[in-house]
Image (spheres, rainbow, N blue to C red):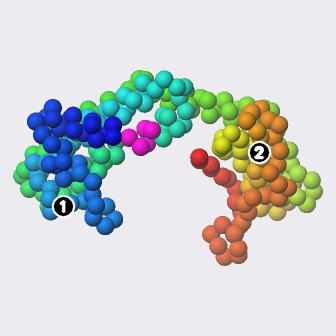
Amino acid sequence: MRKVLILMSALTLLGGGDAHANPLLEPWDAPFGVPPFAAVAVTDFEPAFAAAIAEHEAEIAAITAEAEPPTFANTIEALDASGRVLARVSSVFYALNGTMTNPEMQQVAKTMAPVLSRHRDAITLDADLFRLQLEIELLADVHHRLVNVIFRLVPGRPGSWNERRADTGNSIVQYKGRWYLYHSGEDARRVGRIGLHVAGDRIAGPWRALRDRPILGPGPAGSWDSVSVAQVTSSL
């Protein structure tokens, strides 16, 4: 609902009237979400760009105004989810301008180029947004360093999957109130596998192996991962 109101307000300020008059801003109900190319006129693009930019600015402002401490969900995920309408309008415009251009389309491109550039620069250089992202990055780095201090993996017993090497790596995630640490190891033949340790709601532990054997190993003979599995990157 908030997005719809933002779009309607932006178009009203631009003299566009009813937001539903612009097919670029309406829901696309065709199979696979195909844009309504036949209904789009060149004159639709500049109002659609302006409305989409206004919505994106409001989404960024909502992120930086969040009262709760920055988290991956309310900052990184919210930032990734922002600007969807602008991306949609841009995809249609540049697809048409690149394949079916005309002087009118080229004029829209010329007009919008500095506007879009200023918009992107404003987000990139937003000091408040940068601070929030930096806090999250520093928090992730602190978590990693803390785990490496309090949770030092040592090679396993002779004959085990990690007897030659055991490494904590950097894949630490929190999910549903528990902490998970994905780590790598090598056996005597230097075949890499991935193990998993879990802790409760405190990153300080105690940590325990989810099971004695690795959770991920090489694939069957002839597969792309048949030799070794050396590293894991996790994201939740």
Of residues 68 and 117, which is closer to you in this image?
68
Give the residue displayed 64% in from the left and 73% down from the top: 223
Residue 99 position within the rendered picture, expressed as x and y whole percent measured from the top left: 18, 61
In the image: residue 151, left or right of residue 224: right
Q: Which amino acid does label 2 sit on?
A: Val
* Figure quadrant of the N terminus: top left
Prevailing secondary structure of the magenta residues:
helix
In space, the residues marked 1 and 2 are separated at their CA atoms by 51 Å
Rate crowding at label 2 as few (under 14), some (14 to 19) or many (20 or more) other CA atoms within 10 Å: many
Residue 130 position within the rendered picture, expressed as x and y whole percent measured from the top left: 45, 28
Residue 201 position within the rendered picture, expressed as x and y whole percent measured from the top left: 73, 36
In the image: residue 101, left or right of residue 81: left
Q: Furthest residue to the left?
A: 103
> SS at mark 2?
strand
Give the residue displayed 83% in from the left and 45% down from the top: 208
Give the residue displayed 80% in from the left and 33% down from the top: 150
Of residues 174 and 118, which is closer to you in this image?
174
In the image: residue 22, left or right of residue 205: left
The residue beneath circle 2 is 198
Residue 219 is drawn in which quadrant?
A: bottom right
Vertical side of 95 occupied by 182: above or below: above
The residue beneath circle 1 is 37
Q: Give the range drawn in magenta.
A: 78-82
Earlier in the chain: of badge 1 and badge 2, it is: 1
Of residues 35 and 129, which is closer to you in this image?
35
Residue 80 highlighted magenta (yes or no):
yes
Q: Can residue 233 be seen in this view?
A: yes
Give the residue displayed 59% in from the left and 29% down from the top: 138
Residue 14 highlighted magenta (yes or no):
no
Residue 34 is drawn in which quadrant?
A: bottom left
